[in-house]
Image (tube, helix red, strand yellow):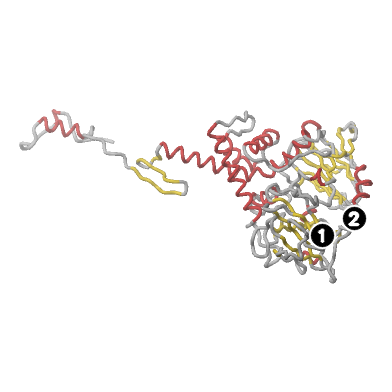
């Protein structure tokens, strides 16, 4: 900028006498450079959903900067909770495999009875499970040997994306086979006689469910044939048989408080970073979680992380129990698909953030079999959290679920109650959270339909079709179709909502 208010004295020529004296001219010249007084800074206050924000000459005040950064990091923590649900849920089971059950890397553990399955998120009460965790950094290439028979399974990466299906919907088509899992970056190998699977993470889960009608026979015949072992070009290691997990108290539920971030940080440190997740990791850096660096959040970060867990889980509950990602499965009811995410967690134009959180907040594992399209194979799960009046299911009330005749399930159907808080099977005096078509003493109506009752006590004469609930505790239900048939897919058969009923003195068990 060029200032022309003042000129050198020798060039100043006045044609007539000025009204100003020489001192006055000097004063006017100096005022152009030095204001007599500084005006007050222009201040503006904006009311927002996070409170008042103050700006001085357009710039945020010191207090506003602090508030905005706290809000940014809190929001990021809440969203990172939702983002991390699939990995943390699986990591908690991985920890239990090693630290609670004393399992080896790749050693299959059996989860057959109520106690063994109690720690799993929304397991089927009637179905035997066998599962293992494999640390591919420790083992190198690893083999899972699948027997022939009515068995379904999967191999998942640490985000619970399907790397391979096993058994009846896998490439072996139920005829059995050997699956060779290669560590990340190892590259493909030529291995005749094996189905080669390329892992995308260091930690993977391999698991099965037995689907035969005779549970004890399936366990006796198939489980001894399940084997796991290391593999090299030169040969294989010693085969490990499956064993019982044991009667131990455990939980696979994502923990609350700072334990959630401890588990998520462990996942981040142990496994490769996906391109899709780099922006999330950039946000976590300001909360003290960064790959390759010690996890030591300071006091401010700890407070924001703790708040993020509380709000993040509340968002996850809403996202799961009142799903907005799809409409009711049967029109006019509150039943919705429980499993709303694809096996690779991708949609056509985006990755399924809310969809995967809606499933993995209350469940664990996924496979192509659980999203089957061909009638008569695989499984489908439909969930309900509300009664016919649109009220949440509550353990203090008694409900009736009418199952119409001829449920579209080639193998069997089951309906199971789960605790809203833990998303696990509720612990009751009855010790059975499920009614299934395989229940030998199930009572049927004259038309072949079945009425199932849920409540703190059984209606008189309905004991065999009753599932006990815990008073004052919320619960929800999964209705499973094993081998769903055409009426399921075209919706010519449908379930009504849970009906709340009042037990009269004559109906109640004394």
Q: Residue at x 83, y 67 (%)?
A: 406
- Residue denoted by label 2: 213
Q: Nearer the viewer, residue 429 or 67?
A: 429
Residue 361's label in the rendered image is none
Residue 174 coordinates in the image, percent (x, y): 89, 51
Location of residue 198 with respect to 447 vertically, above or below: above
What residue is disc 1 on? 463
Front-most of 219 and 79? 219
Position in image of residue 436 (x %, y %): 83, 58
Quadrant where the C terminus sits is: bottom right
Is residue 240 among what the camera can see?
yes
User: Is 420 on the left or on the right of 116, as rendered?
Assistant: left
Identity of the residue drawn at 62% across and 53% down: 318
Q: Is residue 412 above or below residue 272?
A: below
**Could you tell me which residue is drawn at 67 percent across and 40 percent down?**
255
Q: Position of residue 382 (x, y in %)?
A: 74, 58
Badge 1: how crowded within 10 Å, few (<14), some, or many (20+)? some
Depth-wise, is mark 1 or mark 2 nearer the camera? 1
Query: Is residue 135 shown to the viewer in this render?
Result: no
Quick one: label 2, few (<14), some, or many (20+) residues within 10 Å? few
Q: Assign the N terminus to one quadrant of the image.
A: top left
- Tell me which label, 1 or 2, sits earlier in the chain: 2
Q: Which one is nearer the viewer's eye here, 461 or 308?
A: 461
Residue shown at the point (89%, 53%) measured from the top left: 212
Tag 1, which secondary structure?
helix
Q: Are marks 1 and 2 in contact (CB under 8 Å)?
A: no
Q: Position of residue 95 (x, y in %)?
A: 74, 36
Quadrant assignment, res 416: bottom right
């Amino acid at each position: 900028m060029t200032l022309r208010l003042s000129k050198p004295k020798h060039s100043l020529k006045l044609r007539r006498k000025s009204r100003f004296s020489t001192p006055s001219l000097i004063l006017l010249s100096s005022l152009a450079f030095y204001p007599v007084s500084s005006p007050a800074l222009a201040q503006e206050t904006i009311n927002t959903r996070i409170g008042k924000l103050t700006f001085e000459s357009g710039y945020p005040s010191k207090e506003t900067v602090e508030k905005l950064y706290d809000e940014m990091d809190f929001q990021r923590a809440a969203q990172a909770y939702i983002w991390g649900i699939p990995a943390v849920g699986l990591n908690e089971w991985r920890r239990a495999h090693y630290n609670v059950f004393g399992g080896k890397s790749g050693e299959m553990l059996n989860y057959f009875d109520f106690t063994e399955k109690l720690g799993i998120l929304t397991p089927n009460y009637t179905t035997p499970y066998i599962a293992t965790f494999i640390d591919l950094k420790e083992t190198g290439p690893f083999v899972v040997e699948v027997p022939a028979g009515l068995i379904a399974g999967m191999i998942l990466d640490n985000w619970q994306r399907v790397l391979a299906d096993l058994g009846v919907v896998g490439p072996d088509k139920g005829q059995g086979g050997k699956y060779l899992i290669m560590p990340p970056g190892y590259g493909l190998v030529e291995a005749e006689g094996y189905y080669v699977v390329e892992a995308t993470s260091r930690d993977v889960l391999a698991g099965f469910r037995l689907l035969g009608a005779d549970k004890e026979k399936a366990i006796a015949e198939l489980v001894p044939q399940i084997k796991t072992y290391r593999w090299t070009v030169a040969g294989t290691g010693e085969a490990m048989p499956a064993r019982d997990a044991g009667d131990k108290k455990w939980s696979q539920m994502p923990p609350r408080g700072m334990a959630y971030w401890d588990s998520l940080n462990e996942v981040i440190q142990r496994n490769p970073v996906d391109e899709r997740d780099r922006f999330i990791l950039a946000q976590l850096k300001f909360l003290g979680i960064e790959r390759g660096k010690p996890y030591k959040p300071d006091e401010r970060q700890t407070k924001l992380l703790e708040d993020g867990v509380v709000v993040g889980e509340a968002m996850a509950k809403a996202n799961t129990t009142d799903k907005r990602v799809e409409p009711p499965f049967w029109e006019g009811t509150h039943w919705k698909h429980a499993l709303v995410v694809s096996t690779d967690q991708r949609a056509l134009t985006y990755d399924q953030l809310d969809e995967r959180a809606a499933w993995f907040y209350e469940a664990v594992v996924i496979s192509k079999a659980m999203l089957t399209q061909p009638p008569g194979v695989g499984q489908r799960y439909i969930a309900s959290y509300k009664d016919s009046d649109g009220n949440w299911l509550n353990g203090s009330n008694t409900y009736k679920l009418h199952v119409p005749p001829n449920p579209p399930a080639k193998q069997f159907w089951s309906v199971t109650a789960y605790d809203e808080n833990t998303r696990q099977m509720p612990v009751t005096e009855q010790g059975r959270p499920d009614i299934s078509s395989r229940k030998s003493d199930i009572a049927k109506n004259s038309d072949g339909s079945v009425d199932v009752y849920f409540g703190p006590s059984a209606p008189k004469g309905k004991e065999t079709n009753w599932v006990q609930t815990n008073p004052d505790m919320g619960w929800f239900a999964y209705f499973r179709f094993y081998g769903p048939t055409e009426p399921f897919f075209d919706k010519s058969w449908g379930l009504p909502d849970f009906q709340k009923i009042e037990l009269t003195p004559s109906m109640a068990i004394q």
